[in-house]
Amino acid sequence: MTTIKLKTNVKCGACVQAISPQMEQLGLESWNVDLQDPNRILTATGTVTEASLQQALQKAGYHGEPVK
């Protein structure tokens, strides 16, 4: 089980709904986007790689980059 954090361009609740189907397909234990954080951090926990998480975001029309 890993936890990955990505800085995203997800801006609102509707955006979260737009990425939801892609996140569900990954079979994550949990995920959320902190819309209060200026960097809109996506935190995902499960058996997932950073690359597959970024690819899922791209399929939904968004992007994510590693939090440093």
Image (spheres, helix red, strand yellow):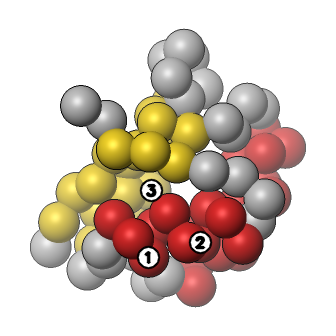
Amino acid type at image mark 1: Ser
Return the x and y of residue 29 as percentages of the image width and height: 34, 71
Q: CA distance from mark 2 to mark 3?
A: 13 Å
Amino acid type at image mark 3: Trp
Residue at x-position 84% and y-position 44%: 14
Return the x and y of residue 42 as percentages of the image width and height: 46, 44
Residue at x-position 15% and y-position 73%: 1
Question: In the rendered structure, are the residues bearing label 1 and label 2 in contact, judged by CB atoms less than 8 Å apart?
Answer: yes
Q: Residues within 10 Å of mark 2 (few under 14, many from 20)?
A: many
Return the x and y of residue 27 as percentages of the image width and height: 45, 83
Amino acid type at image mark 2: Ala
> Which dot marks residue 52?
1
Q: Is residue 29 visible?
A: no
Q: Mark 2: which secondary structure?
A: helix
Q: CA distance from mark 1 to mark 3?
A: 14 Å
Q: Mark 3: which secondary structure?
A: strand
Return the disc, 2 or 3, that comes first in the chain's sequence.
3
Q: Which residue is the site of mark 2?
A: 56
Quarter of the figure that contains the C terminus: top left
Q: Which residue is the site of mark 3?
A: 31
